[in-house]
Amino acid sequence: MGDTAGKEVPLPWKETSPVKQRKEFIDACIAEEGSMAELCRRFGVSRKTGYKWLGRFMGGCELVDRSRRPKTTPKAVSQAMEDGIVASRKLHPKWGPRKLRAALQRMNPGAEFPSVTTFALIFKRNGLVIPRRRKRRTAPSTQPLVHATGPN
């Protein structure tokens, strides 16, 4: 057990929730208990984070964690577009995403089509692609190399 038997060992983590910690930080800032650098050191955050929390609080925002979900999904395609791509692929099952996209652009010159990669994702999502067989790796040689008697 050593020297710590019977002694209370301080834990390295704080037992408060992040929202409580932010609220305590804001209260300390408003009460001007120290400079921003001192408060950030005491609460274990960077000054950038301290100013961010203070700005959010002063702006009327809550101190809860914000969503990390992206605001836009660039690869999102409408259901009608996806159905059209799937129908075209079923008409030409041997065509890949690049060829099919080029053909659809020729037939519909003013229409906006997703990228080739998105076409491939649509094919895969709708089960229109047969996965390639994996190449088998050869086992490493068990015999040592023969010593060369001459060049080449």
Image (spheres, helix red, strand yellow):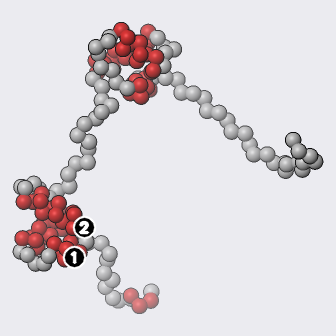
Q: Nearer the viewer, mark 2 or mark 1?
A: 2
Which of the 4 quarters of the picture holds residue 103? top left
- Please state, as top left, top right, bottom left or bottom right, where the N terminus lies in the image: bottom left
Q: Position of residue 66 (x, y in %)?
A: 20, 51
Residue type indicated by callout 1: Arg
Kind of element beneath mark 1? helix
Is residue 125 among what the camera can see?
no
Please say if 150 is above or below 42. above
Q: Residue furthest right?
A: 149
Horizontally, residue 67 falls left or right of residue 149, namely left
Q: Position of residue 116 (x, y in %)?
A: 41, 25
- Please state, as top left, top right, bottom left or bottom right, where the C terminus lies in the image: top right
Horizontally, residue 148 falls left or right of residue 100, namely right
User: What residue do we see at 25% from left, 36% from top?
Assistant: 72
Task: Give the CA distance from mark 2 to mark 1.
Answer: 10 Å
Please say if 33 is above or below 113. below
Residue type indicated by callout 2: Ser
Q: Residue furthest front?
A: 151
Nearer-the-camera pick, 115 or 22:
115
User: What residue do we see at 31% from left, 85% from top?
Assistant: 8
Nearer-the-camera pick, 18 or 84:
84
Q: Position of residue 91 (x, y in %)?
A: 44, 9
Q: Identify the residue under disc 1.
A: 42
What mark, if any, has residue 46 been given in the picture?
Answer: 2
User: What residue do we see at 38% from left, 88% from top?
Assistant: 5
Please say if 148 is above or below 73. below
Q: Position of residue 38 (x, y in %)?
A: 19, 77
Residue count near mark 2 (Cα–Cα under 10 Å), binned few <14, some 14–19, many ≥20: some
